[in-house]
Amino acid sequence: MRYFIEIAYNGGNYFGWQRQPEQISVQQVLEETLSTLLRKKLKITGAGRTDAGVHSKQLYAHFDFDEIQDKDELIFRLNSFLPKDISVKNIFEVKDDAHARFNAVQREYEYIISLKKDPFLQNFAFQINNKPNVDLMNEAAKMLLHHKDFQCFSRSKTDVKTYNCTIVKAYWETQNNTLIFTIAADRFLRNMVRAIVGTLLDIGYEKKTLEEFQQILDSKRREEAGASAPAHGLYLTKVVYPDNIHL
């Protein structure tokens, strides 16, 4: 039988979701814990890869196993054995061909910026000292909705076949002493969101104009865009699937 497992994690101690030869990853820790409790070596396939230091409020992965008699008990035991920075939120049955990565139709991220020193956000938001022009940043963010090829925001050494993404949501909000950027798309390239955030900050600080932002989009050159924002401010917040994956 195939199961989806829903997890959340603080990525500060991990080199991303995906297994690494020499480094600890969320996938490795979850696979080893699940294999131990179910007494069978299991492989887990995630909805996507988060980079080192990036957090996730919702990520799905799938695995195959014989019938699980008590899913609530397994969730409880997993959370007892897993480190404090990884939690299992749900486990549920899906169709045998359901795929956590390929069946996902939308992914959503948030990037959090702290506008003043906050000890409770130290490892969970990017602190800046001067507030940028949020209106300008939102004008630039709207331009993302009308663009398809995002090679300019992609890590240069990557094995993707296409740089096309359909962004359906991209906006900044001010909440108390934080700025929150929300972006949703059918797929994302490696490092894409952090590169977008860094470039939008250049717009907000008026280092680049809206016209130059359009030129960056059209250039398909990563070196034309701004520096990537730090990983610890980024959160994968939602992964959406069609209803037909469920039994």
Image: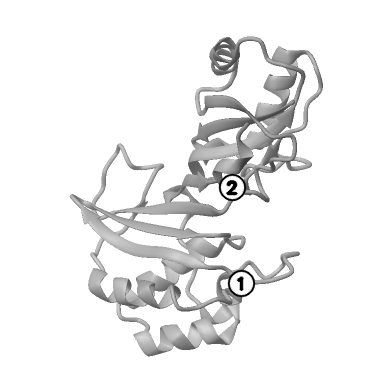
Q: What residue is shown at x 59% (from left), y 17% (from top)?
A: 78
Q: Quadrant of residue 82?
A: top right
Q: Which residue is mark 1?
A: 164
Residue at 55%, 39% (x, y): give it. Answer: 59
Instruction: Measure how far apart labels 1 and 2 are at the Cα level.
Output: 24 Å
Numbered circle sitting on residue 59: none
* Residue 174 rendering spot, x and y as whole percentages: 22, 57
Disc 1, SS: loop
The answer to whether 131 appears left or right of 82 in the picture is left
Residue 62 or 189: which is nearer the viewer? Answer: 62
Q: Is residue 116 above or below residue 76?
A: below
Q: Amino acid at mark 1?
A: Asn
Residue type indicated by callout 2: Ala
Q: Quadrant of residue 71?
A: top right
The residue pinned by badge 2 equals 52
Expressed as whole percent of the image width and height from the top left, the position of residue 125 reads 37, 48
Q: What secondary structure is marked by label 2?
A: loop
